[in-house]
Image (tube, rainbow, N blue to C red):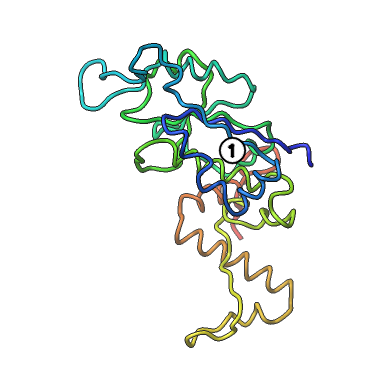
Amino acid sequence: MSGNAGWSATVLTLYPEMFPGPLGHALAGRALADGLWTCTARNIRDAATDKHRTVDDTPAGGGPGMVLRADVVARALDAVSDGAPRIALTPRGAPLTQDRIRSLAQGPGVTLICGRFEGFDERLFEARDIEQISIGDFILSGGETAALVLLDACVRLLPGVMGAASSGVDESFESGLLEHPHYTRPALWEGLEIPEVLRSGDHAKIAAWRLARSEEDTRSRRPDLWQRHSDAADQSPSGARQQKKDV
């Protein structure tokens, strides 16, 4: 096993039966069976102190829904002592990025806290060192699905999980661009051909075509990514923006 063998995921949730869920199958499932990572789901209700195992209460100031109590969630979190980064899945969090995924995959593991109802009592984040992460600008029923997304993205990067060490290199977001299109046999399908350059055997031309398509698709489909990529390309090694010269 590699140095990352045993990468540990602890999930605090009201629905521990949801884990490992789909991550118990395919690539992540094989890695789990091989001991390359572990997944422990803990029920937040176990940290409740009343006979009804209450974890939520009505919002202060009024309003619909219920709010997860800071004291109960903190008690559940304090019972985890693995030293891994602690992350709450919440739409109020910072967007999840491939850079953050890569850094988490290189660490010892992660402790994830899954939100429910209207979210967490804000005092939880004032009293504990917890990173808040969102997987997108949309609302889920709870943080469990978001936790599965984050875990899947991390696990596939662990040493020994993917068949080839380079499998995760030329993919969307790794270079700041969307990945180029892919093709495979048959060469002709429903009147559509594989681009000639990909059948040429000229690796330099193939690489240039792939880069050009990555740039073209990123520019048209994800202008936000293209802007960040362009800004990064305009930075000098010192971090200062290069001055564009008129030709």
Observer-nearest of 179 and 110: 110
In x, y percent, where is residue 114? 44, 31
Farthest front residue in view: 51
Q: Nearer the viewer, residue 223 or 27?
A: 27
Of residues 19 and 92, the one drawn nearer to the viewer in this rendering: 19
Dividing the picture into quadrants, the one containing residue 151 is top right
- The quarter in which the C terminus is drawn is bottom right
Q: Identify residue for label 1.
A: 100
Q: Quadrant of residue 172?
A: bottom right
Report x, y in % for residue 52.
33, 17
In the rendered image, residue 176, in percent from the top left (x then y), is placed at 58, 51
Q: Residue at x 70, y 41 (%)?
A: 35
Tell me: residue 14, above or below residue 48.
below
71 relative to 199 in the view: left or right:
left
Instruction: Say left or right for 116 vs 151.
Output: left
Q: Residue at x 57, y 32 (%)?
A: 40
The amino acid on which the numbered mark 1 sits, given as a three-letter code, is: Arg
Residue drawn at the location 20% of the way across and 19% of the way down: 62
- In terms of secondary structure, where does tag 1 sit? helix
Q: Is residue 86 above or below residue 139?
A: above
Q: Residues within 10 Å of mark 1 (few under 14, many from 20)?
A: few
Q: Is residue 76 left or right of residue 118?
A: right
Q: Quadrant of residue 181?
A: bottom right
